[in-house]
Amino acid sequence: MSIPATQPTASSSGLGEAATHVSGWRAFHDKQFWIVWLEHAIYFALLMMVLAEPFSTWTVLFVFRLATGLWVLKLALTGFRLRRDPLALPLLLFFVGVSASTVFSYAPLLSWSRLAWYSVGLIFFLVSQNIKTGAQLKWLVATLLLSTFITAVQTGWQFTAGMGTKLLYISPGPMREAGLRPRDVVREINGHSVRELWLWRRALRLTQRDPMLYMRVARPFAGGFHYYYTTVPRAAVDEWLRTPGELVTNGYPLRAQGHFYHAIPYAGMLMEAAALCWGLLLTSSCANTRKRVLLMVIFTALAASLWATVTRSYVLALLAACLVTLWMTARPKVRIVATLAAVGIVLAGSFWIRDQRRLSWFNSKEPGTEFRMMMWKASPRLIREHPLLGIGLDSVQQPGNRFDIAAYKVFPVHGGHFHSTYIELAVDCGLPVLGLWLWLMVAYFRHLWRLLRASAHAKWFYRGLALGIFASALAFYLGCLVQYTLGDGEVMPLVWMFMGCSVVLYRLLQEREMENTVPTRADALG
């Protein structure tokens, strides 16, 4: 009696299961299996990094270190084979030069700590060596735009609905002894939000039986708010509430700072993300209406949040980058309209900055500008005295004013810097490192120019991504003139990631061009 072919025998079924088991066991021990999974893990870590970028710098640093460890493990499995990417050589030489300066630093602890933040430059290699497809680039960009849009919405909510309860008067007594001062903004009382006045009254009612009130407080200073916690006896608060007159009101941010410690790094992060979004928006006419509207909403939210930081240098840098990329892609009439719009934005910004910070775009008598210019005047002397290796990263911040900085005598600062990436590198690391940095920047610009030419006839996302990365790099170059952007761990992960994405994008466009130029079998026979 014959056995139907559709019904396997017990023995054949057993052999199939054994074969599958052996195949799975071999795959488990196969190096290629682990290399693929490590690549997936590294890409997932990159997604987590951009998702956390606007919210927690320490989370970004932790995930970065984890991803770096996974990458080293992958390199060990592949025999430490690296793809030869553009920009890799000047970047590596720059870090070698910075490390050499750190070894001979006048303040080793400060320098090594700063070098740890510089190490996020390895994000360039995490991206360029591990991202292989256009879909991966799209998800990375989409995740970044989503996370930055969320923080922009939160910023808008703080400026419209308030961020806490502002204290107008604090009488001498236990509340002052607890550290509370007029203009402080209370955000929580024993875990209850007091973002608005009705929430303040509700929190006081819910905690009326609590003997102590644990408060989360935001104290205003030049760059935004400094957060601290304090504990106040409930009896002292009740006595203060019986004081005649208005004691509290709604509290609003002075300058947007997101989840960061200061408005300036928040502005730098928004500038980079907004420039990238702008590039995609310029080419979104080739996409569907839904995507175009979404990109317009995201860019508007990011630009408005950047405006709310009242950070003059980054606002002007983004405006210049957007105007340059629009001039490169638009028709003559659009260029004229865009130029007039840029002039209008600058004029409106003058009134906004004067209203919010009592400043103009430039005023040498303004304390921040005066401090910056005094630091710049001190830099030539330090460069002449330490031309080769500099004084070491952050060494100028050590107590005692060892280098006789005049600005430290005039302004009571505990630690400052030179407010210019280029000057900071020359002073901290010496002229050779500044030369390596300029080499890297020039090489990056030339690479981006080749990328723009290669993407001229590419799909809208690839073309937009190339324009967005170019705009972000141009804004970064301009911002570095008057900001120590290289020292901001909140901004630089995006700069290095965009640099890596530019290499991946150029490689994908080159591969696609080669595929289109390879003759088919029919062409060869013909």
Image (cartoon, grey):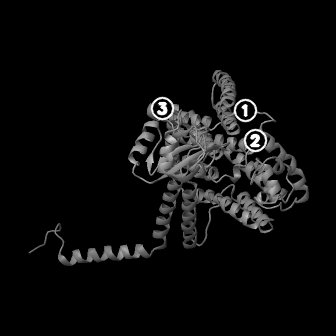
Expressed as whole percent of the image width and height from the top left, the position of residue 286 reads: 51, 33
Expressed as whole percent of the image width and height from the top left, the position of residue 478 reads: 73, 41
Nearer to us of marks 1 and 3 is 1
| SS under mark 3 | helix
Residue at 72% from the left image edge and 61% from the top image edge: 95
The answer to which of marks 2 and 1 sits earlier in the sequence is 1
The answer to which of marks 1 and 3 sits earlier in the sequence is 3
Q: Amino acid at mark 3?
A: Val
Q: Residues within 10 Å of mark 1 (few under 14, many from 20)?
A: some
The quarter of the displayed image where residue 117 is located: bottom right
Horizontal side of 328 relative to 429 (left or right) equals left
The residue at which mark 1 appears reads as 359
Expressed as whole percent of the image width and height from the top left, the position of residue 448 reads: 67, 45
| SS under mark 1 | loop
Q: Amino acid at mark 1?
A: Leu
Q: Is label 2 in contact with label 1 (beta carbons under 8 Å)?
A: yes
Point out the image quarter for the N terminus: bottom left
The quarter of the displayed image where residue 171 is located: top right
The answer to which of marks 2 and 3 sits earlier in the sequence is 3
The residue at which mark 2 appears reads as 368
The residue at which mark 3 appears reads as 293
Which one is in front, 87 or 417? 417
Q: Amino acid at mark 2?
A: Gly
